[in-house]
Amino acid sequence: MKKKIIVTAAIFGSLAVIAGAFGAHSLQPSLSAKELEVWHIAVQYQFYHVFALLFLATLSRYKTRLVNDCYYLFTLGIVFFSGSLYLLACRELLGWQWLRVFGPITPLGGVLFIAGWITLAFAAFKDK
């Protein structure tokens, strides 16, 4: 489990660096200030939860269900929260107005993040 968590964190971490650089250098001329802000929020939260995954790896030696649940909550939270914000930020640029349907997915990702943090607290509490 520890290896899976670290590999996932490394992949999401590298993607966050790429997304941050892409937003700062390539998208800046094409997106509005508001859209760039949304993009940067997506990058920020992705990084926060990469670090959460790395911390979770320290608890993974116990292979409890809580650690496993926390892993999936953070991972899906990144995909839903940051992923939907990336798409929403580029909606105008792509000319895909239908991407508006991803709006309700963002709060779902936020709920997954909150559930992940609560689950992490329980996992740490149970850690001997």
Image (cartoon, rainbow, N blue to C red):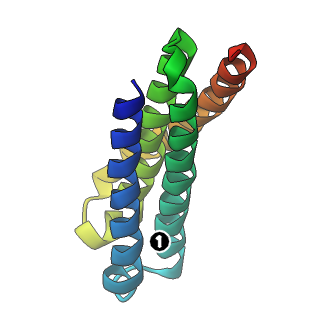
Identify the residue at the far bottom of this view.
29
User: Residue 11 appears at what percent x and percent y?
Assistant: 32, 50
User: Which quarter of the figure is the C terminus placed in?
Assistant: top right
- The residue nearer to you, when weighing 80 against 70, is 70
Q: Residue at x 55, y 61 (%)?
A: 44
User: Residue 109 appears at what percent x and percent y?
Assistant: 51, 37
- The residue nearer to you, when weighing 20 against 57, is 57
* Residue 110 relative to residue 17: left or right: right
Which amino acid type is shown beneath numbered disc 1?
Glu
Q: Residue at x 42, y 33 (%)?
A: 76
The residue to which callout 1 is attached is 35
Asked if 69 appears above or below 25 in the picture, the reply is above
Q: Residue at x 69, y 26 (%)?
A: 118
* Residue 115 relative to residue 15: left or right: right
User: Residue 82 appears at what percent x and percent y?
Assistant: 45, 51
Q: Residue at x 58, y 39 (%)?
A: 55
Disc 1 element: helix
User: Which quarter of the figure is the N terminus placed in?
Assistant: top left
- The residue nearer to you, when weighing 87 against 25, is 25
User: Residue 105 appears at what percent x and percent y?
Assistant: 46, 38
Asked if 45 appears above or below 37 in the picture, the reply is above
